[in-house]
Image: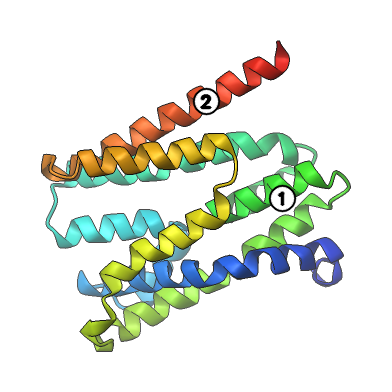
Amino acid sequence: MAIVLVNSDFRDGIKDILPLVPPVAVIALVTGVESAKIGFNPLQSSIISALVYSPSVLLTAFKLLELETPTTILLITSLFVGVRFLILSVSISPYLKKMKTYWRWILAYFLWTPVFALSIARYDSKKDTNRKEYYLGTAIPIWITTELSIIFGSAFGARLPEYLQLDFVVPLAFIALVRRLVKDRPSKLVVLTAGIISVLGYSLPLRMGLIVAVFGSMIVGVAVKWEEEKVVTS
């Protein structure tokens, strides 16, 4: 690990991920607050977060639990929100195929959208990148930020003043995160599709608008990516 810490690619990963730390911290903080609302203490929240390393999935699940959403809808919604990890894994696996199996498992645990986006961009732009070190450089700060923020939110969320309007801050944090990551045509179309469907489906019963938005944006993303690859190979 000492070798990893002094590696220039590892340092580059840390430098590249730092601008994304604040919005991630806000999302994780509110996730911790929501976990406390449904009865989890800081230790339980940290364990759940470590096992299900995705603040967006946890935040969705906690919110639906708070609203007493039927279990079936909660599970389906959480599954759809988390399905993107399958897509991210398939997309990044060719870049990591030369690594030992246990390293691929370790890196898979740390896979999150910011880590994926930065790593793919780096691997494509700088072919001689030490992929493992750069990946860890982006992943470790995000993981530490997420865990500490969830613990803090769970422990002190009830004491935070209401005027902070945390429910309003979360969408802003997601917008800030997306704004830094969305750069190419497929990702822009995915975000646009998800936003339009979410607005149109807001009044659907049982929060089904979210499920429809996730499913619809996934279809658009896959279709656009397939179209681009078809053009390149033709």
- Indicate left or right for 149 with 186 as reference: left
| Tag 2: amino acid | Val
**Residue 17: numbered disc:** none
Q: Are marks 1 and 2 in contact (CB under 8 Å)?
A: no
Q: Is residue 155 above or below residue 136?
A: below
Quadrant in which the C terminus is drawn? top right
Residue situated in front as seen by the camera: 65 or 213:
213
Quadrant in which the N terminus is drawn? bottom right
Q: Quadrant of residue 66?
A: bottom left
- Disc 2: which residue: 224
Q: Residues within 10 Å of mark 1 (few under 14, many from 20)?
A: few
Q: How is the image coloured?
A: rainbow
**Image position, residue 220 (x, y; %):** 43, 28
- Indicate left or right for 156 with 17 as reference: left
Q: Secondary structure at mark 2?
A: helix
Residue found 42% across the figure and 59% down from its top: 174
Q: Residue furthest top?
A: 234
**Image position, residue 87 (x, y; %):** 52, 36
Which circle's residue, 1 or 2, is located before the other in the chain?
1
Q: Residue furthest right?
A: 128
**Residue 103: numbered disc:** 1
**Image position, residue 200 (x, y; %):** 21, 39
